[in-house]
Image (spheres, coloured by chain):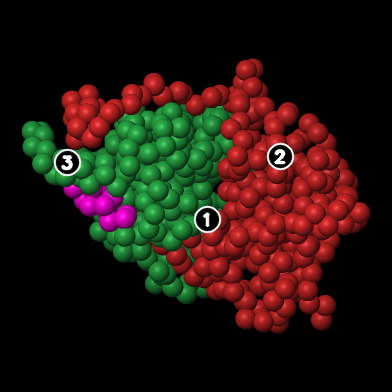
Chain colours: A green, B red
Amino acid sequence: MSATTALVVGDSASQAVRSAIRAAKACVGAGKIDLLLIGKGANSGAASASKWNGVSTVYYAEGETPCTAESATPVIRERVSAKDYRYVIATANSFGKNVLPRLAGVLGVSALSDIIEVVESNVFVRPIYAGNALATVKSNDEVKVLTVRPTAFEPIEDSSEGLAEIVKVQIPADGVQSRWLGQEATENTRPDLTTADVVIAGGRGLKNKDNFKMLEEMADELGGAVGATRAAVDSGFVPNDMQVGQTGKVVAPQLYIGIGLSGAIQHLAGMKDSKTIVAINKDADAPIFQIADYGLVADLFEAVPELLQKIKELPKRAE
Amino acid sequence: MSGRRILVGVKRVVDYAVKVRVKPDGSGVDTASVKMSMNPFCEIAVEEALRLKEAGKAAEVIAVSVGPKKSVDTLRVALAMGVDKAIHVSVPEKHQELQPLAIASIFKYVVGDQRPDIVILGKQSIDGDNNQTGQMLAGMLGWSQGTFASQVEIENASADVVNVTREVDGGLETVELSLPAVITCDLRLNKPRFTSLSNTMKAKKKKVETIDVSSLGIDIEPKLETLSVAEPPKRPPGIMVNNVNELIEKLRTDAKVL
């Protein structure tokens, strides 16, 4: 009998993929974990991921563009049949959510989305109903296909002993039914929203795009990222990839400051695991105050500039 | 040529505005007396299919719902919105929580039967939050997939590709899909229409085709076993501060985050 092994797949050597390795470790115990990186930049990603703790072999399939699900799936499937992995695991980001259920469909097995805990090797916890309930689920599938919520697993650290082996694999050219045409990447000089230590989020109360600049300035002052509610995105204040919530990004920073947002269930689903939650809103009945550690009922246009000024004046903490 | 056909999936779920309660015995979420509605992402799927038809890029829109008897109510909403045909794949009450693998297998059957060129589904249902069915179906069929769509463009009624703009982590990306294809909708694809009272009344009289799932020979037994459902841990109650100075003080000395 071969030992329990896991294949972690991703499109870059990001912090979020390091979290997936941590989850894989919880699944396989002393078993082997391999990593497969697919798409543009996979080659250089493989070089950095080879330093990660617990990774045996890093496979990479370099592409000229980010890889579509139609091209990525056969690459993963081929690895799975060659190595007989018991787990295929990815981060629940736009790559993992797109590709892994397709792979499960091809393999004819179930998939588990967005797991937040590995209880046993075949028992997992995942949020349902926008995080208003947590389901503990047992998988009886021979190959377990999982996506992992990155904020729930500490990213794996670098290894002190040697590098993982790096192996190149091919993306099959045949049978490609879709073509990547291009992207409109949002310009961003701040930390990644999903892994930032500080998130400053704004809602419709900000009234327009320009007012989000106050939040950006505060984020820069604290080394954080800026997020938003669906209402703020729909109103055109900020791009879609800044949406935090049930169907947007999930954040769990050390400090979350929600400004001018009421706290709809769907938004709370994306931020309620933040360590410290601050809410600033002029409506004392806003639901966000029910989960905030510190609430301030105030007009944001007075409170935020004052807060920003005072943060700037704070003596830096001695580390 | 008979013209392009679009199949859309619609699911009956707890209304998005309801805050659900976990049953005290931990067996699941109490859905007995709460408001049910069409899954918001499915509404967007229906709307998109109807817009493609209205733009002359599709000939027929077929709505499918898989679930117990009450799913017919959701199909009637789709009929009131304007779909041409409604199919209910009827599942015994005890199976009301079918898993994505079973749903995708059932859709695969319906696709084989109805021969659509495009299947449009919501990207996820707001109860299970799985975000799997469309991708699984595309994988099972070997079709191309355009998930999390915020824009769908087809040049004309006979085009053999569709361009889908997708909401991804870093912004937006566009892919060109060969047809047939599965598309799953994100929030900003469109704003679903309201249904008029007269259309709602008319929809009540329209025919809904029923297929009994047991006649399909598809294994719908859950492969994932839900052991328990629990409330998420509650946060300790917070405090209200009176002004910015107090907030800074708390964040600095108590929470130690500044």
Residue type, numbered disc 1: Asn
Kindly identify the amino acid type of the residue bearing the numbered disc 2: Met
In-front residue for pair A137/B3: B3
Q: Are marks 1 and 2 in contact (CB under 8 Å)?
A: no
| Residue A213 on the magenta span | yes
| Residue A131 in sight in this render | yes
Q: Earlier in the sequence, mark 3 or mark 1?
A: 1
Q: Amino acid at mark 3?
A: Ile
**Tag in front: 2 or 3:** 3
> In this rendering, do the residues under marks 3 and 1 share a single chain?
yes
Q: Which residues, given as a range, are shown in magenta? A: A211-225
Q: Which residue is mark 1?
A: A98
**Residue shown at 32% from the left, 33% from the top:** A296
Mark nearest the camera among 3 and 1 is 3
Residue underneath mark 2: B36
Instruction: Report how far apart the C-alphas of labels 1 and 2 lie in the structure.
Output: 28 Å
